[in-house]
Image (tube, rainbow, N blue to C red):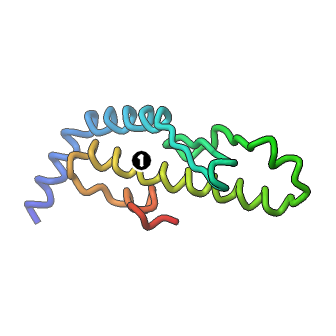
């Protein structure tokens, strides 16, 4: 019981530092940019570490193809690949920032490495 109290006291003592680290991490996640691609690179999507879609690029030759469903599938695949890469990168960044300290919910927040698909 007293061990838990000392852990809590240590956490409270470091609360300002933890808050500062979280703010830095949030800023860093906004600067992290990953790209996903599909169709052999004919469609690409860029996503940041905050899971925000930044851009989608479509090869112009695909726009003349009457198969809208194929284009939709390629865009979806590219965006999903980019989001998966962003989750993995964000989880790694946050884990390294935490310095090995277990942060409850961290793996669920970023979909755990390889598991958030």
Which quadrant of the figure contains the N terminus?
bottom left
45 or 25, which lies in front? 45
Q: Which residue is mark 1?
A: 90
Residue shown at the point (20%, 51%) measured from the top left: 100
Q: How many marks?
A: 1
110 or 46, which lies in front? 46
Q: Position of residue 37 (x, y in %)?
A: 60, 50
* Residue 24 placement: quadrant: top left
Secondary element at image label 1: helix
Q: As drawn, is 110 to the left or to the right of 11?
A: right
Residue shown at the point (36%, 39%) measured from the top left: 22
Q: Position of residue 57 (x, y in %)?
A: 70, 40
Q: Position of residue 63 (x, y in %)?
A: 85, 47
Q: As drawn, is 108 to the left or to the right of 103?
A: right
Mark 1, other Cα within 10 Å: few <14 / some 14–19 / many ≥20:
many
Residue 85, placed above or below residue 117: above
97 or 8, which lies in front? 97
* Residue 93 placement: quadrant: top left
Considering every residue shown, the one lying at the far left of the view is 2
Residue 27, placed above or below residue 113: above
Residue shown at the point (75%, 43%) measured from the top left: 59
Residue shown at the point (48%, 52%) measured from the top left: 85
41 or 111, which lies in front? 41
Q: As drawn, is 100 to the left or to the right of 80?
A: left
């Amino acid at each position: 019981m007293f061990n838990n109290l000392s852990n809590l006291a240590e956490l409270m003592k470091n609360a300002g530092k933890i808050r500062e680290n979280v703010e830095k991490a949030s800023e860093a996640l906004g600067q992290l940019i990953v790209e996903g691609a599909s169709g052999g690179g004919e469609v690409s999507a860029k996503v940041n570490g905050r899971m925000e879609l930044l851009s989608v690029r479509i090869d112009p030759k695909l726009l003349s193809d009457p198969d809208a469903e194929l284009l939709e599938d390629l865009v979806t695949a590219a965006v999903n690949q980019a989001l998966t890469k962003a989750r993995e990168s964000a989880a790694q960044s946050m884990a390294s920032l935490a310095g090995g300290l277990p942060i409850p919910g961290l793996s669920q927040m970023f979909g755990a490495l390889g598991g958030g698909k």
